[in-house]
Image (cartoon, coloured by chain):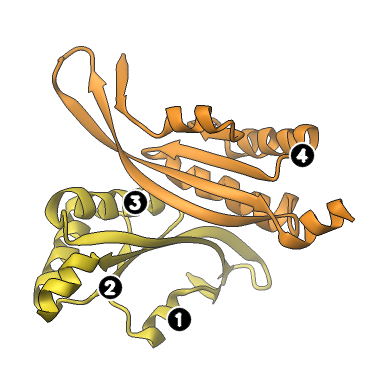
Chain colours: A yellow, B orange
């Protein structure tokens, strides 16, 4: 239905950064996906991304990881907000604005050092 | 009903930073409140804060200000996320966790310089 005109999603794909896109599923699904990703691939950085109303849930995902399941392992490095422009194919030329958010989680310094030693 | 046990709200009051708390009212109310604050007091910094589901709306408020009404004037300096602990008075000792967010907007460098000259 909607075509993305201007978005940060493509940049993520190029950077090869592991990204969890948060949508309308229950919170725990995204938390489990992030934990599985962490355990399988052990990335140093992990991105949680969302648009519109899912932004609140993305913050919940990041906070549950940071304070519960991956406590002491991951920390919030950066939070960015943007406005994406999405074109509605039903009415060409008209673009809708939707807020989006990216939360960058990274391994804590002490965890990175522990791995190296 | 609920008593805040651990929150960033008190810090904001101490710092004297102008803060808009976003809740369940329509988006435009908070946007207008922020614009009124900006026009009356001309602060260099402005904080948009929210908890739980209102977080998505807080991002909308910040993005509408940054890209529409105060375009070229304000920019996002920092976005912080936390977990607040709220005690339910009905069941003492039990604390609920709720995600919270703070978006710090500040005047762009060129706007600050224009004011000084």
The disc label shown at residue B42, or none: 4
Q: Position of residue A116 (x, y in %)?
A: 13, 80
- Please report, as a chain letter, where disc 2 is located: A
Residue at 74% in and 39% down: B38
**Badge 3 or badge 1: first in the primary sequence:** 1
Distance CA(mark 4)–CA(mark 2): 38 Å
In the image, taking residue B14 as reference, residue A15 lies left or right, namely left
Label 3 sits on a secondary structure element that is: helix
Against B15, is A67 above or below?
below
- Please report, as a chain letter, where disc 4 is located: B
Q: Viewer-nearest of labels 3 and 2? A: 2
In the image, taking residue A100 as reference, residue B64 lies left or right, namely right
Residue at 74% in and 50% down: B69
**In the rendered image, which residue does mark 2 sit on?**
A45
| CB-based contact (under 8 Å), mark 1 and mark 2 | no
Dividing the image into 4 quarters, which one contains the N terminus of chain B? top left
Q: Position of residue B61 (x, y in %)?
A: 58, 45
Residue at 65% in and 73% down: A92
Against B101, is A18 above or below?
below
Distance CA(mark 1)–CA(mark 4): 36 Å
Residue A53 visible within the image: no
Question: Which of the 4 image quadrants contains residue A14?
Answer: bottom left
Q: Viewer-nearest of labels 1 and 4? A: 4
Label 2 sits on a secondary structure element that is: strand
- Please report, as a chain letter, where disc 3 is located: A
Q: Viewer-nearest of labels 3 and 4? A: 4
Label 4 sits on a secondary structure element that is: loop
Q: Viewer-nearest of labels 1 and 2? A: 2
Distance CA(mark 3)–CA(mark 4): 30 Å
The disc label shown at residue A59, or none: 3
């Amino acid at each position: 239905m909607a075509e993305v005109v201007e978005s940060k999603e493509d940049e993520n794909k190029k950077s090869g950064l592991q990204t969890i896109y948060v949508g309308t599923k229950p919170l725990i699904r995204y938390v489990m996906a992030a934990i599985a990703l962490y355990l399988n691939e052990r990335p140093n950085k992990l991105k949680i991304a969302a648009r519109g109303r899912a932004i609140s849930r993305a913050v919940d995902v990041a906070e549950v990881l940071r304070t519960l399941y991956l406590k002491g392992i991951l920390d919030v490095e950066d939070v960015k907000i943007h406005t994406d422009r999405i074109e509605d194919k039903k009415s060409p030329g008209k673009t809708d604005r939707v807020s989006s958010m990216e939360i960058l989680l990274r391994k804590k310094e002490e965890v990175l050092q522990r791995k190296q030693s």
